[in-house]
Amino acid sequence: MHRRTFLLSAAALIPSAAFSYPAETFSPAIWRDLGAGTQTIVLNYRASWSLTCQIKAELIADALVANPEYNRLVFVDVDWDTFGRSQLTERLKVNRRSTLLVMKNGTEVARLENQPYEREVRALLDTALAA
């Protein structure tokens, strides 16, 4: 068996919900509603085809299981392929997929770009809780 065939077959056996976490799907209407509130929001710029983004999603899901306090945060997944060139993305100066932004009262609190590492993701979530 070829390695690529094996890896694709093995990946198909992993349930997609195994790495899921509660997240809103970004839309301008959702952003207007959430942006006006006082909640701490974690914007996750991601692409379905990006391995780094998939690893990040797994790390976020694991962090939520390990620390239930993270469930106080509002997660919003932003599809890079759809909104990567949007006015919001440009205004927030997001230059690439695989970016996590913590927002509070319309202001950026923290940012993590292309860092699919457990320690960095949890540090960002800890910063979001403290905001």
Image (cartoon, grey):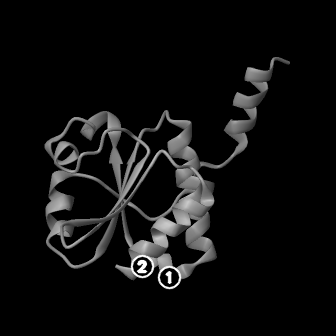
Label 1, residues with CA under 10 Å away: few <14, some 14-19, many ≥20: few
Q: Position of residue 116 (x, y in %)?
A: 56, 49
Q: Position of residue 38 (x, y in %)?
A: 22, 79
Q: Position of residue 37 (x, y in %)?
A: 18, 76
Q: Is residue 12 left or right of residue 41?
A: right
| Circle 2: element type | helix
The mark tally for this picture is: 2
The quadrant of the rendering that contains the C terminus is: bottom left
Q: Amino acid at mark 2?
A: Leu
Residue at mark 1: 69
Q: Is residue 10 left or right of residue 106?
A: right
Q: Is residue 109 above or below residue 1?
A: below
Work out whether mark 2 precedes mark 1 in sequence or the reverse, and give the earlier one.
1
Residue at x 43%, y 73% (from the top left corner): 127
Q: Quadrant of residue 6?
A: top right
Q: Is residue 107 above or below residue 12?
A: below
Q: Is residue 96 above or below residue 121?
A: above
Residue at x 42%, y 79% (from the top left corner): 129
Please report contact status of discs 2 and 1: CB closer than 8 Å, yes or no: yes
Residue at mark 2: 129
| Circle 1: element type | helix
Which residue is the extreme one toward the right?
1
Q: Amino acid at mark 1?
A: Glu
Question: Disc 2 to disc 1, how far (Cα)?
Answer: 8 Å
